[in-house]
Image (cartoon, grey):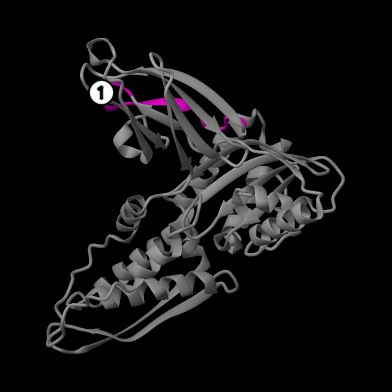
Amino acid sequence: RVVNEPTAAALCYGHKRSEQSTVLIFDLGGGTFDVSILDIAGSLYVVQATAGDTFLGGLDFDRTLADHIVADLKKKYPDANLDRRHMERLMTAAKDAKQALSNAKTTTVQLPNLSVDKAGKVVNFEMNITRETLELLTKPLVDRAFNICLLALNAAKLKPADIGDVILVGGQTRMPYVQQRVAQFFGKQPSKRVNPDEVVALGAALVAGSREAGSAPTLVDVLPVPIGLPGGAGEMQEILGRNTALPADVNVLRESAPGQPLKINVYQGDSDKVEDNELLGCLSVEDPGANKGITRAELTFQLSSECLLTVKARMLRTGEEREIKLVTQQLSDDAVARMGKERLKTDLPVGGIPGAEEETSPGLWARFLAFFKGKPGK
């Protein structure tokens, strides 16, 4: 079966625990941030609410620190020529420094032979960075995470004090500042019972093993992202809202323009504008014998307990049916590309190294796409 990552993390946490508890999954990974609140009672796992930010993750922490490094580099070497290869080295150095500062109070970024200036002199860059500096730089990112936590808590009608345990998921939660802010916000230290890098995989393995043994836990999930149809003036008409309990079944009526087929474009996303959301799929039906050529149909949106969507169209005049099956929560290649360009854009000059060709290999960009491509819910 399909299991959402936060739910899998909760399954791992609740394995062999009999007491009832309310837990919050704080999932800050490389690309996205997700929050899920679940009630656990034995083998029953009920998701109360979810919230998230698809543009908040470890990559944004890397980029923020990289911007700080570049500012210092430009101050020290205003004539340095930088191209894509140098930007890749800077991003890698920023990530390494960020990780080092999880265990140390200070670290040094060293980039020998980074570039050359206009006079042809080699640029050997070195910079000291403290944990305090990193925390100041990334505070706005961490603040955004807790704004998302408030959205999830409000949806579940809970307060931070009502959460029994906070489960950290994702590599970025290893940052001491993130753990410190979690403790301050919820009034308790996050759980150390699970490994943030392994908890999702272990939870999925537990589900697979329990299903094979015939003792699978009962999972009651919710829809994490709204689903809808285009409305008037390019607006999104929400059909199934965020946190709709699964499974779900909703019927709506639609009709086409005269002489035109009825085109049903299904979107997912939080934006009020259709163009800012993700197109899940299309279904087209036509009733040539209808009065004035207007096709009228009853649309049924069926969400399974695994958040798989089936859209059925039944023409009112003939009773003929058509349907499509869609996978929700999976970002398209176009969405991933837009996400990457927004995060990796830079004001660094491109090219300019005497005698060198412009870097054409995808480098960091390719690794970014490879990291996200094919990851459901990410």
Image height of 178 relative to 131, above or below: above
> Does the segment drawn in magenta span residue 236?
yes
Image height of 326 relative to 360, above or below: above
Q: At which x and y percent is residue 22?
A: 74, 40
- Kindly give the residue lying farthest to the top in the view shown: 291
Of residues 251 and 185, the one nearer the viewer is 251
* Region rendered in magenta: 231-245
Q: At which x and y percent is residue 292?
A: 22, 11
Of residues 350 and 266, the one nearer the viewer is 266
**Which residue appears at 39% of the width and 17% of the height?**
318
* SS at badge 1: helix
**Which quarter of the picture shows residue 126?**
bottom left
Q: At which x and y percent is residue 285?
A: 33, 27
What residue sits right under mark 1 in the picture? 233
Q: At which x and y percent is residue 164?
A: 76, 42
Total label count? Answer: 1
**Which quarter of the picture shows residue 313?**
top left
Of residues 254 and 117, the one nearer the viewer is 254
Under mark 1, the amino acid is Ala
Image height of 25 relative to 321, above or below: below
**Which residue appears at 45% of the width and 79% of the height?**
108
Image height of 177 relative to 49, above or below: below
**Which residue appears at 32% of the width and 33% of the height?**
274
Position of 196 compared to 283: left or right?
right
Position of 89 compared to 37: left or right?
left
**Which residue appears at 22% of the width and 62% of the height?**
347
Of residues 306 and 173, the one nearer the viewer is 306
- Kindly give the residue lying farthest to the right in the view shown: 18
Q: Residues within 10 Å of mark 1 (few under 14, many from 20)?
A: few
